[in-house]
Amino acid sequence: MEDKAIKKVTVVGAGFVGSTTAYTLMISGLVSEIVLIDINKEKAEGEVMDMNHGMPFVRPVKIYNGNYSDCKGSDIVVITAGANQKEGETRIDLVKKNTAIFKGIIAEVIKHNKDCILLVVTNPVDILTYVTYKISGFPKNKVIGSGTVLDSARFRYLLGDHTGVDPRDVHAYILGEHGDTEVATWSIANIAGIPMSKYCETCHGCKDGLCKKEIYENVKNAAYDIIKKKGATYYAVALAVKRIIEAIVRDESSILTVSSLIEGQYGLDDVCLSVPTIVNKNGIERILNVELSEKEIKLLKESGETLKEVIKTLDL
């Protein structure tokens, strides 16, 4: 007998990221029911109306604005609600505001659904993934943060743009915090199995790898740059969330750099951050111990310790 198909997703938060995520799921054909919840009921209703008017152009899917009671029966609850990151504000600056908001959200969700996978997108995503794990009491495999899935995509895009290769054929990861201490793992980056260090010898795009620092800085600061130019980021992050949901819905066992609870891997413990992880219908299937350089492991530990210092200031 086949497992029950995953068919219902609830998105908490109808802001730029939440509504774009719902829209991206709508056109993906992955699920048959999408609920949008927001404290501003009129905003959620308007977003749902707008999407429903495009229903003749997509596969059948039921989309409606609801209340927390509508979380019942959801296979995945995506949390995008929270205070927005303002220009000049780091993701960590958001932590206390959004931790307080999350305490209320998680309490409401688990009143109606204790069997779903919780997918956290709100920033600072690694800390809020840890907060969600602690507050919810859910098994560790069922609490996932969007982590550095987007950062890794930015990294692959910029490397592809630099080398003239389709970014889908660039294999590279950003690990650690989704934020200022994130780590570019150059030691395992490759194109068609050719390590970047060797590919660079024939690329002639720059001398002595001088573009590496620039590419990393552009990845790390991408959100700040976009927020400065247009006020918020939402297209690419919605696609990243869709990709994670796709891996769960289709039971793909795909390797994604989602954020989840780390227990001893890479010398870290009791913190959520992003490392290569197998994602399928169970949520987190397994965290992979990928061989990194000594420098990258050191930076990854520093990233984890930075997050742990912030976690210590929270009332959990």
Image (spheres, grey):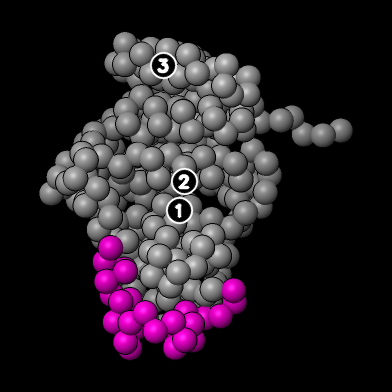
Q: Residue at x 49, y 57 (%)?
A: 257
Q: Residue at x 59, y 77 (%)?
A: 193
195 horizontally vs 183: left or right = right
Q: Residue at x 37, y 50 (%)?
A: 126
Type of amino acid at the residue the image marks with label 1: Val
160 horizontally vs 219: left or right = right
The residues bearing labels 3 and 2 have C-alpha atoms spaced at a distance of 22 Å
10 Å neighbourhood of mark 2: few (<14), some, or many (≥20)?
Answer: many
Whether residue 261 is visible here, answered yes or no, is no
Type of amino acid at the residue the image marks with label 2: Ala
Q: Would you place residue 169 above or below residue 119 in this image?
A: below
The residues bearing labels 1 and 3 have C-alpha atoms spaced at a distance of 28 Å
Which comes before the other along the chain, label 1 or label 3?
Answer: 3
Type of amino acid at the residue the image marks with label 3: Asp
Chain part drawn in magenta: 192-218
133 horizontally vs 232: left or right = right
Which mark identifies residue 50? 3
Which mark identifies residue 138? none
Q: Would you place residue 3 above or below residue 164 in this image?
A: above
Which comes before the other along the chain, label 2 or label 1?
Answer: 1
Which mark identifies residue 149? 1
Q: Which residue is mark 2?
A: 240
Q: Would you place residue 264 above or below residue 111 in this image?
A: below
Which comes before the other along the chain, label 3 or label 2?
Answer: 3
Where on the picture, by quarter, is residue 250?
A: top right
> Is 161 or 226 nearer to us in this picture?
161
112 is within the stretch colored magenta: no
> Is 6 or 144 nearer to us in this picture?
6
* Element type at mark 1: helix
